[in-house]
Each structure stands twice: as C-alpha cells, then as structure tokens.
Image (cartoon, rainbow, N blue to C red):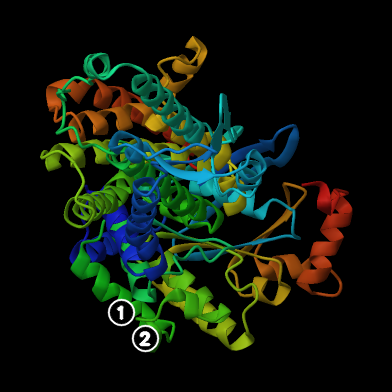
Amino acid sequence: MDRRDGKAASRRDIRGVGRSMMQAIEATNVYKRFGSEAVLSGVDLTLRRGEILGILGPSGAGKTTLVKCLLGTLGLDGGTVQIDDTPMPNLRIMDRIGYMAQQDALYEDLTGIQNLVFYARLKGMDKHAALLQAHELMKLVELERDENKKVVNYSGGMKRRLSLTAALIGNPDVIILDEPTVGIDPLLRELFWAEFDRLKALHRAIIVTTHVMDEAEKCDRLILLRGGAIIENGSPKELKAKTEQGTLEAAFIESARRSGKGGDAA
Amino acid sequence: MKSFVIAGRLIRQIAGDKRTLAVMLIAPVLIMTLLYLLLGNGVTTARIDIVGADYTASDSMKEIAEITLVSTEEEAIDRLKSGESDGYIAADRYVAEGTEPSITALVKRAFQEYTLEQNLSALPAQMAAQAEELFQTPEIEMYYGSGDYEEFDFLAPSMMGFIIFFLVFLLAGIAFLRERISGTLDRILVSSLRRSQLVAGYFLGFGVFAALQTVVIQSFLVYVLRIHTGTNFLMVLLINLTIAGTSLAMGTLFSAFARNEFQLFQFIPIVIIPQMMFCGLFNLRETPLFLQLLAKIFPLSYGAEALRKVMLQGLGFSDVWLDLAIMLGFTLLFFALNIQVLKKYRKL
C-alpha cells in the first residue's frame, strides 16, 4: 500500500512541475455506447498541468459519460485514455485523481471531517496527515465551524463545498469536476473559482464540466460537446473571435448549426 | 489495509445511528422474549364436558384434561360452540371441536384415557390391577440434553440464526445500496481500492456487529431466559459469524438488483422467508424429496443445523465443520458474483 504523508506529496508536486510539459490527460478517439445508442463518438482531448479545461455542452451531450470514461470508471467501447502516459484504468493512477460528481456523494450520517478523512485514507494517506489536511481544506471552504456536524444537517451549499474538498483531499494531480457549481449561489461560485485558480497555480490539471457560459469564460481552453462529439475546441478568446457577436453563446450556437447535430441525440 | 478503512467507516456509521443500533441489539432480544412467552405458555390441557355421568377425574386425567360435568347434550353443544369446551362425551358419543389439530390431539388423548378408565372399572378388581400394569409407561432416558427440553429450547438456536441472517441481510444490503444510489460508490472507486477490498471491508464491519449480536442474544438466552444453549460459546460465535458472512454476501449482491430500498425489501419474500421455513421450524423428514433438496440450496438451513448440533446436542467442531464449509462455499460464490457485478462500476 503506498502510504503518502505531506512530505511525499510535496515531493511529488515538485516532480509534477518538472513534468508539466507532459500531457496530464490524453484521450484519443473515445467511443462509448449504451446498448445500441452511441453516447460518445470519437472524442479526442488533451490536458496539460496548470491548465483548466472546460467541457461545455447542453445536458445530454455526454459530459458525464466523457468524465467517467476519463476516470476509468466506465469501460470504453473504443479509443484510449492515458493519464501521465499510463493507460487507464490503472489503480495506482486512481489515487492521484480527485473527482467530484454531480451528486454530492457524501455519507450523511458521518460528520464533515469524518467524510474527508475517510476519502483521504482510501487514497492512501495516513490518519494524521489526513486529519491535518482535512482541517486545512475545511478552513479553505469556510466550513471549519461545521466540521463536526453530521452532513445530514448541512445545507445544500455546504454539501457542495464539502464535496469539493473531498475531491481535493490527498493532493490529486488531476482534478475532474462534473458540474461543480450547479445549484450554488454566486458568492460560493466565486469561492470555487478562486480555489480552481489556486490549484492551477499549483500545476494541477483541472477539468470542469458546465453548461453556464460565463463560467466557461474562466477556463483556459474549452471543448464544446454536442451529441457525443466535439464540435469546437479552443481558448474562449479564439472561440469568441470566430463570431460577429463575440460571445461564447453565439460561438456555441453557430458551431451547433454547422455540425448539424441534434442536441438531445445522446 | 483499505478494507479496514471501509470497515471503520461502517462501524462509525452504525454506532452513530441509534435506531440501527437498537434494531440490531434490542430487536433480537424482543423477538426471543415473545417467542419464549408464546411457546412456553401453549395449551397443555383439553377442556372436556361429560354429559349426564358421574365421573371424578383421576390424576392421569387431570394432567391432560379439565373435566366439567353437564346435564344435557344441548348444553354441551352450546358450550362447545361458545368455545368454553373443546369436546364432550355423551354416553357413547365422543365429539371434538376439531379445528385446531394440537387441541384435537389433546382431546383424543383425554377420550382414550376416559374409555380406558371406564373399561378398567368394568373389570373385577383383581384383573383391573393387572390390566393397569399393562399400561405402565416405561422410564425414558434422553440421549441428548436433560429431558426437560421444551419447544422453545429446540427453536431458539434456529431463531438465533435466522435473526442474525435477516438483520445482516437488510442492514448490509441497504448500506451497499445507498453506496450505489448516493454516488459514494463511484467516488470511492476513484482510488486504488480494489473491488474485493471493498466487499471484504463490508464483511469486517458487519462481522463486528454480528459478533456483538451473538453475545447479546446468547447472554440473554443463558442468563435471562435460562434455556439450554450448550457450553461451547465460541463455537456458537463461529457459526453465527459464518451465517452473518453468508447473509452479508447475499444482501450486498441482491442490492445490485434493486434501485431503491423498497425494491430491496421486495426480495424478502423470495430470499428471506424460505430461509425461515427451512431453518428447522418444520421437520422435513417426511416431506417430498424435492422439498428436502430445496432446503439444501438455502444456506441458513446449514447454519441452523450447526447451531442445533452445538446448542442442543452439545457437539463440537468435528460435527459441524461440513455445515460451516458449505456456508463458506455459498459465501465465496456470492462474494465472487458481487465482485463481477461491481465491474459495472470499474473494470479493474
């Protein structure tokens, strides 16, 4: 079992900087079917360390399926996913991924801190280091006063914050967040994006799915997903420059028309 | 090691939930008490009316029946209809109420005793004494136990096995189901945790509670109800842990085929009730062969059998190892199936 304490984690961070030119995630020609229905058809994407990649698309476009394929929790029907040059799924790599799903995925009958320590220990941290980092993260999302309350007593926004910290515990190199800001107030959204930027500065590779345009602006690079295929790929600036109106929304609508794909195909 | 992380979390969850804890520890005591009271106070005498005769109950009659003398048959019929008597004798007519077989059996014995006494009294005194000797019951020795086993003593081991099986099936099944529907399963599988470690963690966590249940039920049986439970407590513990393991493997496996708690409960009539029927409540010796074979596919029939051997017959490991091995086989089978089913969540 690879135990990791704070020291080992920071050593790995330094190594991460050294390898920052390497692709953190490289997905090639990913296909996924549910029954006879093609949910992803030939998706390619790459992500470097220190970069935030936004996956933008209407609901049903295949965002969550793509995320699960990248994580390795869903088997592929075609194509490959590599994280740090290692084909997925790979158990060793799994410990270095932080994942936040659309569902909060918390144990409601445990306290906030117990949830975090549990997830940290699954990632191989020892008890002491886990507790230390859990307190740190709780402070970061302003939950330190509620850390000993059972999650069942948390409000929706508090659960969202705790769910984010559960994805960040264990210093993951690759952070995959599926609709992290859905249903939270603007203030909290500010807090989340400040945190994403901090992680980016720490050379982490971050993927965020969203269907909110103004959030997409904050990503370094965007992928527009529709009907299970990528219809546009580039920085927000590049995408906006392609349209007369100069907005992401217009870029999205125009490329959707060009691709001629139905949005609810997936 | 990661299994211990899973087990630790489960223990923390259950220990922090007073309702679940109460169900696990108090419910078995409650069920056992009710069963003890109900079985211990069953009907032991028939109520018989005798029409128009002068009869004084002998000692052996008093043991099996309560005799009332009435003057007319109409009166006897009224008393039978209103439930005041279980049967009556009018001259040479012997009438039993006849709905409840166990009471009918008592009534029959009383009628036989009555006719025997009547026949004996018709004989000359000397012959009567000789004839009575013919009907002496022999002194009976009990090979196992002390001879004062009552119905509850016999059923307690099976019930203990059933209660542990049932509660572990439900609680572990629900815990695993929640893991799926709340999304925590997806999240915990984004780590180097192996699927087998996850299931093993469940075994460890619920094993602790099954052990605790065994201690509570066993102590209650021994110190409060004061029934026969054998002396080999560790053997009972081992059997109960095996039962809990099988039950957990089944509960977590079946939870994969339920989308919510209610759908899990729908498995109770199919999976749980037959286990109860075949765990020793009924003697299968004279049932058709297919029923006896059917019992063999229900793991609890082996567990209950082992418990009876240890608690009632005072047998040891050499007599129950095969039962335990069969249950272990069932457990490994369900365990392996569950790990296959979990592939849906992560191939590796």
Q: Position of residue A227 (x, y in %)?
A: 77, 48
Q: Which mark is residue A135?
A: 1
Residue at (19%, 51%) from the top-left corner? B226
Q: Position of residue B189 (x, y in %)?
A: 43, 49
Q: Secondary structure at mark 2?
A: helix
Question: To which quarter of the image does residue B153 belong?
Answer: top left
Whether B286 is drawn above or below A136: the answer is above
Whether B248 is drawn above or below B137: the answer is below
Q: Position of residue A207 (x, y in %)?
A: 54, 61
Q: For the residues labelled 2 and 1, say whether their Cβ atoms are less than 8 Å apart.
A: yes
Q: Which mark is residue A19?
A: none
Residue at (39%, 19%) from the top-left corner? B119
Pointer 2 local density, CA inside 10 Å: few below 14, some 14–19, many at least 20 = some
Q: CA distance from mark 2 to mark 1?
A: 7 Å
Type of amino acid under label 1? His
Q: Which mark is residue A144?
A: 2
Chain letter of the residue beneath label 2 in the structure image? A
Type of amino acid under label 2? Glu
Chain letter of the residue beneath label 1 in the structure image? A
Q: In screen coordinates, is B305 left or right of B105?
A: left
